[in-house]
Amino acid sequence: MARTGGFQDDDFWTEFHDFLFSEQRHAQAEELLTTSPLLSFPAGARVLDLCCGSGVFTVPLARRGHDVTGVDLSPAMLERARRRAADVGAQVTYVQADARAYEAPGAFDVVLNMFTSFGYFEDPADNARVLRVMHDCLAPGGTLVLDLAGKELLARKVTPPKVVQRGDDLMVQTDTVLDDWARLRSDWVLVRGEQVTRATLVWFVYSAVELRSMAEEAGFGRVEIFGGFDGRPYDENAERLVLRAVREA
């Protein structure tokens, strides 16, 4: 039996990679970049994917002609992203860095933070700091697109344990609400033959109102909230919480 730590533990990303970054997820990213009005950027835009993982968005963005930089803390994820880019001849700059400390003032036209990659630091001030990093990395007029599972959506989807099978591997995920809905804990159990791997992630969850306030406090203007990448309202039919905001001059 093995146990991995949380999101800062590279073993976690290695062990659970196939469930977190499936080929279906890569295909979903390709489709979103093709169809979403929120992910339609000017030709040659300088794009930062902060917490890029294994290159789910960086590679297809580069293939569309954008100047793309992917930043992640995990060496294992960055190595997978580099291999994926090399396999298709995509030119992407990858940087290993903590999202709280990455510095590239005014260097990007677009900053992306996708698939609920926000809110994982234990200190709320650190999560606020990540938003300021996003703001400061944008050129004046640049756009942030931040996508996560909103608190309102999670409240109707936190269910008994979820079971996912990929080939012979089996994963069980159990979610627990903490601190009066301030945070969520996910306990994961992965069974591969005789090997059992356990991991726990705890992260802050945000309502649309809370996330808007945080973005404004980080200096963003023209903050908009959507219920999906098709630009639908954030209402009872929402599928995601997608925030779009602008660094004003």
Image: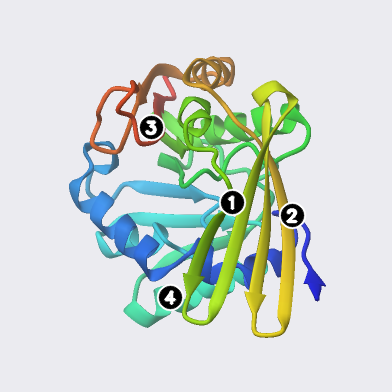
Residues packed near mark 4 inside 10 Å, few (<14), some (14 to 19) or many (20 plus):
some
Q: CA distance from mark 1 to mark 2?
A: 19 Å
Secondary structure beneath label 3: strand
Secondary structure beneath label 4: helix
Identified by mark 2, the residue type is Gly
Q: CB atoms at circles 3 and 2 under 8 Å apart?
A: no
Q: CA distance from mark 1 to mark 4?
A: 32 Å
Q: CB atoms at circles 1 and 2 under 8 Å apart?
A: no
Residue annotated with mark 2: 6
Q: CA distance from mark 3 to mark 1?
A: 37 Å
Judged left or right of residue 125, residue 155 is left
Q: Quadrant of the C terminus?
A: top left
- Extreme residue in the front direction: 160
Q: CA distance from mark 4 to mark 2?
A: 25 Å
Residue annotated with mark 3: 143
Residue annotated with mark 4: 84
| Mark before the other along the chain sequence, 4 or 2 | 2
Identified by mark 3, the residue type is Thr
Residues packed near mark 3 inside 10 Å, few (<14), some (14 to 19) or many (20 plus):
many
Residue annotated with mark 1: 161
| Res. 233 image quadrant | top left
Using the image as rendered, state which of residue 10 and residue 206 is in the foreground.
206
Q: Residue 185: tell me if it is visible.
A: yes
Identified by mark 4, the residue type is Arg
